[in-house]
Image (cartoon, rainbow, N blue to C red):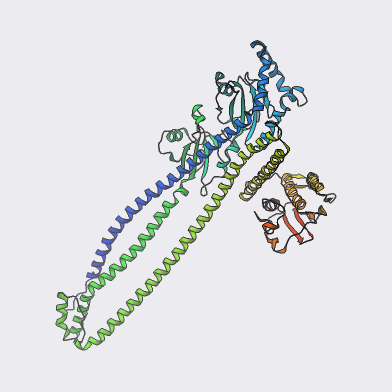
């Protein structure tokens, strides 16, 4: 009898492959549509985000320029200064035009050789109003120079010596004078000849009560101060802000001298200015060696369009970093596709097995019957022709029915356990993925919060400093009687206001110093010097405060200290802070400042007989924004940043700072500096 032939490819494989191919076609189409749709949405979202950031920074620059213009108008258009300009204009009343021209030529010839002892120098720079302008320039870090001319262009007042006496031949003067009509003028970024700084200038006409132009005031603004928001801006690891002019030259870029280099090629610059998209990918970079995504917005100051000035804020970031989410999308879809393929293959074979199983059962029963085993059971419930065929064999295999049922039950239990274990494993994997996603999101939010905090602190400090200078100037004008006589009570109130303004200015400076130290942007000028001399100068400057409280002030400096490398200004800042704290908290007794020479170190001590520090308050020392004791126990107010700043400065010198104190008996603050720099 011939043995049946066993075919290589069965119904199960054919059916499984049919299901797999069908589902793969659906999967490929679905994933393709999802990827390309998601790619477009994410890509457009990223680009629009960069464009919005460039618009936001452009708006900030426009606002800063408006505020600087208003401040200069307040400084230069003061009524007292207008009176001085009016008096100067009277000098030309009885002079002919030829005499006026000769006068200006004579003054221009004398001007370059003026010395500080020259009476002419004192007349123009040591008068009350010029000194006031100099005081404003010294206080407002954003203003590099201010001066005022009369209606003929001759110098009247100035914060410092100008390059020329006669200014009417300058283009900015002509633009501001405007044939006697007067208009505010702004220059583009340029090198100021008097201050030798990269700056922009505002020229403001001074008018009398009738509206007639009586003179021109000019304020030169340091471009670094105006562009402070750009310095602190960053996005991701490579994203930064760039400011370019109408020719594509860099006005601001970290590490590049203003106006010394172009940021775009001619082709790129024409493409950007002629495009409506406000962004493009730069491939032939003049500054960076990689492909960059650049999104730009124009600084829309009203005076810019009037005088043909063009500034563009560009947010530039490495294209690989920018489009990293797209790569992650592709990776996620790839992993999801692989997972689904596995599921499809598994389910296809399971379904194929279920379909083919009755046929296999019948085939097995047929083989058993052919071997003579007539008791082989058949359990087929397909309700079709296969079941009809199987019923024909049931009589022959009825004896084996119970064993077949037991085997089937065992198989079902095994499949249930496999499914249960598979479900548990799937839930565990999903829980792990959720935890990882939560941790990643938390990390991103923390990093974003730190960036926003840095930008907010820098922006708020800059926004407070400018109006604070105007407030201080206004109080000073009223106090010195320029705005009219004041009584004693009014003077007391104004002096109280001035002290609080000075205190607020110190607080802002502390915040800015700590921010720079924390972000690593505080410059240090390490030079070889005499530490004892710096400490002695600090003590001398603080001794009047101690004398005013009848506090004994002792200085005990070690002799023959070797010369050391340190930043004199920063160490002086630490000493003034420690001595100032000792004076504030000492009611009676004394203060002692001493230096001690050690092994390759110098230890500095500031000892006081104040109230001391509680043991539970010791951990709060040198932490930012921390003040000791409960609010009602504090005797003096402070920013809570002094000791934190001092700690950062000492640690930047490779030194150490600490305190030893016994409550009720005073405190001693120590810090040590290395004589020779330690090798890490």
Relative side of 422 to 220, left or right: left
Relative side of 398 to 157, left or right: left
Height in image: 678 above or below 406? above
In terms of image quadrants, where is residue 173? top right
Height in image: 309 above or below 626? above
- At a point 28% along the width and 83% down the height, the residue shown is 407
Report the quarter where the N terminus lies.
bottom left
Q: Position of residue 12 (x, y in %)?
A: 24, 70
Q: Position of residue 448 (x, y in %)?
A: 52, 52
- At a point 38% along the width and 74% down the height, the residue shown is 421
Relative side of 587 to 91, left or right: right
- At a point 69% along the width and 34% down the height, the residue shown is 135
Q: Is residue 10 visible?
A: no
In terms of image quadrants, where is residue 405? bottom left
Query: Which is nearer the eye, 518 or 382?
Result: 518
Height in image: 193 above or below 475? above
Relative side of 396 to 177, left or right: left
Q: Position of residue 664 (x, y in %)?
A: 78, 61
Query: Which is nearer the eye, 123 or 323?
Result: 123
Q: Is residue 343 visible?
A: yes
Height in image: 519 above or below 260? below
Report the quarter where the C terminus lies.
bottom right
Query: Which is nearer the eye, 376 or 432?
Result: 432
Query: Which is nearer the eye, 617 or 287?
Result: 617
């Amino acid at each position: 009898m011939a043995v049946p032939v066993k075919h290589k490819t069965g119904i199960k494989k054919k059916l499984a492959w049919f299901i797999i191919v069908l589902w793969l076609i659906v999967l490929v189409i679905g994933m393709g549509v999802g990827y390309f749709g998601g790619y477009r949405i994410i890509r457009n979202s990223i680009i629009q985000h960069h464009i919005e950031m460039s618009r936001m920074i452009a708006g900030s620059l426009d606002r800063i320029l408006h505020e600087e213009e208003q401040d200069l108008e307040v400084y230069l258009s003061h009524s007292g200064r207008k009176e001085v300009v009016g008096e100067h204009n009277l000098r030309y009343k009885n002079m002919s035009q030829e005499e006026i021209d000769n006068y200006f030529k004579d003054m221009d010839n004398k001007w370059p050789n003026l010395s500080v002892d020259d009476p002419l120098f004192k007349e123009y720079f040591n008068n009350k109003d010029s000194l006031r302008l100099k005081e404003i320039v010294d206080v407002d870090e954003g203003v590099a120079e201010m001066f005022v001319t009369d209606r003929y262009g001759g110098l009247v007042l100035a914060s410092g010596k100008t390059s020329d006496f006669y200014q009417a031949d300058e283009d900015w003067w002509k633009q501001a004078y405007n044939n006697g009509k007067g208009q505010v003028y702004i220059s583009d970024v340029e090198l100021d000849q008097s201050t030798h700084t990269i700056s922009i200038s505002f020229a403001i006409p001074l008018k009398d009560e009738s509206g007639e132009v009586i003179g021109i005031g000019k304020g030169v603004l340091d471009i670094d101060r105006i562009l402070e928001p750009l310095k602190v801006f960053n996005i991701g690891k490579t994203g930064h802000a760039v400011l370019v002019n109408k020719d594509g030259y860099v006005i601001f870029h970290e590490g590049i001298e203003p106006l010394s280099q172009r940021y775009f090629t001619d082709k790129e610059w024409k493409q950007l200015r002629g495009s409506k998209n406000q962004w493009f990918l730069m491939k032939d970079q003049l500054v960076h060696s990689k492909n960059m995504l650049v999104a730009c917005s124009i600084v829309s100051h009203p005076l810019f369009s009037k005088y043909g000035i063009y500034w563009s804020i560009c947010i530039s970031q490495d294209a690989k970093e920018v489009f990293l989410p797209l790569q992650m999308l592709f990776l996620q879809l790839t992993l999801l596709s692989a997972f689904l393929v596995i599921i499809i293959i598994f389910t296809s074979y399971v379904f194929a097995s279920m379909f083919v199983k009755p046929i296999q059962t019948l085939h097995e029963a047929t083989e058993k019957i052919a071997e003579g085993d007539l008791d082989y059971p058949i359990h087929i419930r397909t309700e079709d022709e296969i079941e009809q065929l199987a019923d024909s064999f049931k009589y022959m295999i009825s004896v084996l029915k119970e064993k077949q049922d037991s085997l089937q039950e065992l198989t079902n239990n095994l499949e249930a356990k496999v499914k249960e274990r598979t479900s548990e494993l799937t839930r565990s994997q999903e829980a792990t993925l959720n935890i990882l996603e939560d941790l990643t999101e938390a990390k991103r939010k923390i990093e974003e919060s730190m960036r926003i905090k840095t930008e907010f602190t820098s922006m708020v400090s800059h926004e407070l400093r400018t109006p604070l200078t105007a407030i201080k100037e206004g109080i000073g004008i009223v106090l010195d009687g320029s705005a009219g006589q004041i009584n004693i009570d009014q003077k007391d109130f104004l002096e109280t206001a001035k002290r609080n303004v000075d205190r607020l200015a110190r607080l802002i400076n502390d915040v800015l110093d700590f921010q720079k130290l924390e972000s690593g942007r505080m410059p240090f000028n390490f030079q070889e010097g005499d530490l004892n001399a710096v400490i002695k100068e600090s003590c001398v400057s603080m001794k009047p405060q101690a004398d005013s409280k009848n506090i004994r002030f002792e200085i005990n400096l070690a002799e023959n200290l070797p010369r050391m490398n340190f930043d004199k200004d920063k160490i002086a800042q630490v000493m003034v802070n420690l001595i100032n704290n000792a004076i504030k908290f000492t009611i009676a007794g004394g203060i002692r400042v001493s230096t001690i020479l050690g092994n390759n170190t110098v230890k500095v001590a500031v000892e006081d007989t104040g109230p001391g520090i509680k043991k539970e308050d010791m951990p709060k020392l040198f932490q930012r924004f921390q003040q000791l004791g409960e609010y009602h126990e504090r005797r003096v107010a402070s920013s809570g940043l002094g000791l934190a700043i001092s700690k950062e400065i000492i640690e930047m010198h490779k030194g150490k700072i600490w305190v030893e104190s016994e409550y009720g008996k005073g405190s001693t603050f120590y810090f040590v500096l290395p004589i020779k720099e330690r090798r890490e």
